[in-house]
């Protein structure tokens, strides 16, 4: 005989889950936030509803997510403008709620109806949401959560393109040097994704904003912060030597000021930075169409450069032989250029 006094609660539909999420987030208004008890109660409701969203989108130990319900929930979240609330209420959410949101975010962005990504399309019509996420790097409590959400957005070309071309992109040059190491590192991860995920978009962006971008980037390469110098130099190699950026690279290696930056980094106290700088410096030297100004700088500094290069070594390893061969070619080219310049006087 069954003695069940309580019927198990009926699972919420995707429409119901979207509605309770919206209602609970809207309850986090200005009045509620300043009243401790009211805020605690509202936050409990938000966290409960976020758990329901997570279970429907990701599943749990017992239940696999239902693809139809996942798509329906995503559509309802877009239809009811819940995405705005998910993003704008981030600063007042608790740690657990933010963690659940980050876990759900990539699932939401990946949902498609036909060939259309529902949430991506919504954000394309509300680009200010991306601006909000970027500016949140100034709030160290939620910066890493926002960074994770931004990097998921950047996987989509239209969203990455918007951030690159928006005024808020300039903020990354500040964020990557913030005093909080975790926040600065996360900001650099996002900055790197923006400059490497979509090569053609990046190439067009750099062509259109060449002077402005490299003026700011030079400040990172010459930063007093070791981590900033090393990361920005490594990133420069990655996106500058990409094949779609070949025209950008050709322009970069024609400029004396860029050569001077690499020569300075060759003298850095860090061996890792010296080696990274060499891989860009060698492109200046190996360029068969070096302008006269570059040749003059190489000739004027050839003795110091040769001394630096002779003392530069990657250490023992499989790459050692190739590095030595490249270094020898660069040394010979500097000697050749210097000799020709002196004869031309």
Image (tube, grey):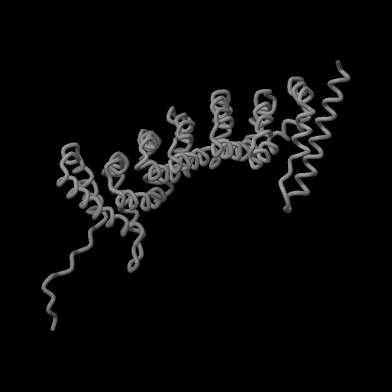
What residue sits 66% from the left and 40% below the top?
A: 276
Judge from the rendering whether residue 168 lies leftward or rightward of residue 15; answer left or right.
right
Residue 300 picture location, percent across and down: 77, 22
Above or below for 185 versus 171:
below
The answer to whether one can see residue 238 in this image is yes
- Quadrant where the C terminus sits is top right
Query: Residue 219: which quarter of the image?
Result: top right
Quadrant of residue 88 within the rendered picture? top left
Position above or below: 79 against 16: above
Q: Residue at x 74, y 35 (%)?
A: 308
Does 298 appear above or below 119? Answer: above
On the image, the x and y values in percent for residue 329 come to: 81, 38
* 99 left or right of 232 in image: left
In the rendered image, is residue 127 in sight?
no
Near-viewer residue (276 or 203): 276
Q: Which residue is situated farthest in the bottom direction here?
A: 1
Total numbered labels placed on residues in the image: 0
In the displayed structure image, the side of residue 236 where residue 84 appears, left or right: left
Does residue 107 appear to the left or right of 314 in the view shown? Answer: left
Residue drawn at 39 percent across, 52 percent down: 107
Give how far across and how far down residue 60 sits, in percent.
34, 64
Using the image as rendered, state which of residue 131 and residue 185 is in the foreground: 185
The image position of residue 302, as x and y in percent, is: 79, 27
Q: Quadrant of the N terminus?
A: bottom left
Among all residues in the image, which is located at the extreme right?
Answer: 343
Q: Residue furthest top?
A: 345
5 or 46, which lies in front? 46
């Amino acid at each position: 005989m069954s003695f069940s006094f309580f019927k198990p609660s009926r699972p919420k539909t995707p429409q119901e889950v979207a509605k309770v999420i919206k209602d609970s987030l809207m309850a986090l208004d200005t009045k509620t936030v300043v009243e401790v008890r009211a805020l605690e109660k509202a936050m409990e409701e938000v966290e409960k509803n976020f758990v329901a969203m997570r279970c429907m989108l990701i599943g749990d130990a017992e239940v696999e997510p239902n693809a139809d319900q996942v798509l329906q929930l995503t559509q309802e979240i877009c239809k009811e403008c819940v995405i705005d609330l998910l993003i704008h209420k981030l600063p007042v959410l608790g740690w657990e709620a933010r963690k659940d949101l980050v876990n759900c975010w990539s699932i939401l962005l990946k949902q498609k109806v036909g060939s259309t990504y529902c949430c991506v399309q919504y954000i394309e019509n509300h680009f200010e949401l991306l601006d909000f996420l970027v500016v949140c790097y100034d709030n160290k409590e939620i910066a890493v959560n926002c960074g994770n959400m931004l990097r998921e957005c950047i996987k989509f070309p239209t969203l990455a393109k918007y951030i690159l071309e928006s005024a808020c992109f300039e903020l990354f040059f500040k964020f990557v040097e913030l005093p909080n190491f975790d926040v600065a590192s996360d900001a650099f991860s996002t900055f790197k994704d923006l400059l490497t995920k979509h090569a053609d978009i990046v190439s067009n962006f750099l062509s259109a904003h060449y002077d402005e971008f490299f003026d700011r980037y030079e400040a990172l390469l010459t930063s007093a912060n070791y981590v900033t110098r090393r990361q920005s130099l490594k990133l420069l190699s990655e996106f500058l030597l990409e094949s779609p950026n070949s025209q950008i690279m050709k322009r970069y290696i024609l400029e004396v000021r860029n050569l001077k930056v690499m020569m300075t980094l060759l003298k850095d106290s860090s061996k890792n930075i010296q080696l990274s700088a060499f891989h860009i410096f060698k492109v200046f030297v190996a360029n068969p169409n070096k302008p006269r100004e570059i040749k003059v700088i190489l000739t004027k500094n050839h003795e110091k450069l040769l001394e630096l290069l002779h003392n530069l070594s990657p250490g023992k390893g499989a790459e050692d032989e190739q590095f030595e061969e490249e270094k020898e070619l660069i040394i010979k080219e500097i000697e050749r250029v210097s000799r020709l310049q002196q004869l031309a006087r």
